[in-house]
Image (cartoon, rainbow, N blue to C red):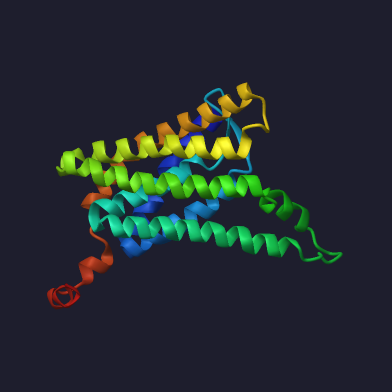
C-alpha cells in the first residue's frame, strides 16, 4: 500500500505547491506552474509503477495539476489567459524535446557517467513525443472551451466544482485516448493497450476529483502582488 499512500500525498503536495506559486506570484505563478509541471510530468512518465492493482506510468497527478491551473486562470482571469497558459505549456514541452535531442547527440567524455541515463530518460521515440504534445494541446484547449461553456449554465461561485470536474474529466478522457492511441496502439496487444488506457484514466479521474477543494482555496486566495497593488495602481492598470 506504500505507493497508494505515497501517491495520495504526492498529489496533495502538487496542489499545495501550485497554491503557493499562485499566492506568491499571482497568475504568473500559474503560467510558470503549467510550463514546469508539463515538462516534469513528461520526464516522470518514463517510470512505471504499480498502484491500486494497476500498472501505470508516473506523472499523472503532476500532469493533472495543469488542468487545475488552467481552470483557475479561466475562473479568475478569463479564457484568454487560460489559453495562453496552454500554449506556454506546449511550447515548453516542445523546446524540452528539441533541446534534449540536440544534447544527446554530443559525444560524451570518457569520464562521463550520465549519458546513458539521459538517453534512457530523454530518448523519447518520435511516436511518444508527438503523442504527448498532440494530446496535451487538444485536451487543454478542450478543457478551456468546456469550462467556459459550462460556466454559462452554472455561473455561481458555489458551482465551481461542476465547472472544474466536468471540464477536467471530459478533457482528460480525450487526453488519455489520444496519447495511448498514438503512442501505444499497435505497439502492445489490444488487451494490454486497453489496460494502459483504463488505468491511466482512472488515476487521472481520482486526482481530478481530489483537486476540487484546492480550486476553491485558489478562488479565495489573493496573490501577494494583488495585495500590494494600490488603488492608484489598479486604476492605472484598468
Query: For the C terminus, which image quadrant?
Result: bottom left
Furthest residue toward right: 110
Tell me: residue 160, above or below residue 122.
above
Residue 132 showing in the rendered view: yes
63 vs 173, nearest the viewer: 173
Position of 46 compared to 233: left or right? right
71 vs 171, nearest the viewer: 171
What residue is rendered at 37% in x and 35% in y? 170
Q: State how many labels appear.
A: 0
134 vs 50, nearest the viewer: 134
Q: Position of residue 32 (x, y in %)?
A: 42, 61
Query: For the N terminus, which image quadrant?
Result: top right
What residue is rendered at 28% in x and 55% in y? 79
Q: Quadrant of residue 115?
A: bottom right
Q: Position of residue 144 (x, y in %)?
A: 33, 48
What residue is rendered at 57% in x and 62% in y? 95
Position of 97 compared to 140: left or right? right
What residue is rendered at 23% in x and 59% in y? 222
Position of 103 compared to 19: left or right? right
Q: Position of residue 142 (x, y in %)?
A: 37, 44
Tell me: residue 161, above or below residue 107.
above
Q: Position of residue 97 (x, y in %)?
A: 61, 57
Residue 57 showing in the rendered view: no
Amino acid at each position: 500500500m506504500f505507493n497508494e499512500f505515497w501517491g495520495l500525498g504526492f498529489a496533495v503536495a502538487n496542489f499545495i505547491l501550485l497554491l503557493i506559486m499562485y499566492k506568491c506570484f499571482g497568475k504568473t505563478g500559474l503560467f510558470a506552474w503549467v510550463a514546469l509541471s508539463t515538462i516534469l510530468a513528461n520526464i516522470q512518465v518514463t517510470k512505471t509503477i504499480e498502484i491500486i492493482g494497476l500498472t501505470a506510468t508516473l506523472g499523472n497527478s503532476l500532469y493533472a495539476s495543469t488542468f487545475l491551473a488552467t481552470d483557475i486562470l479561466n475562473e479568475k482571469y478569463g479564457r484568454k489567459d487560460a489559453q495562453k497558459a496552454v500554449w506556454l505549456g506546449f511550447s515548453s514541452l516542445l523546446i524540452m524535446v528539441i533541446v534534449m535531442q540536440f544534447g544527446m547527440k554530443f559525444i560524451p567524455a570518457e569520464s562521463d557517467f550520465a549519458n546513458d541515463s539521459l538517453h534512457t530518460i530523454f530518448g523519447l521515440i518520435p511516436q511518444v513525443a508527438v503523442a504527448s504534445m498532440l494530446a496535451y494541446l487538444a485536451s487543454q484547449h478542450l478543457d478551456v472551451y468546456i469550462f467556459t461553456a459550462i460556466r454559462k449554465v452554472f455561473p455561481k461561485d458555489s458551482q465551481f466544482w461542476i465547472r472544474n470536474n466536468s471540464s477536467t474529466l471530459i478533457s482528460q478522457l480525450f487526453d488519455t485516448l489520444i496519447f495511448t492511441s498514438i503512442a501505444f496502439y499497435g505497439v502492445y496487444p489490444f488487451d494490454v493497450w486497453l489496460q494502459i488506457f483504463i488505468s491511466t484514466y482512472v488515476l487521472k479521474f481520482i486526482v481530478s476529483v481530489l483537486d476540487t477543494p484546492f480550486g476553491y482555496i485558489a478562488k479565495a486566495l489573493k496573490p501577494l502582488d494583488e495585495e500590494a497593488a494600490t488603488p492608484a495602481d489598479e486604476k492605472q492598470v484598468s
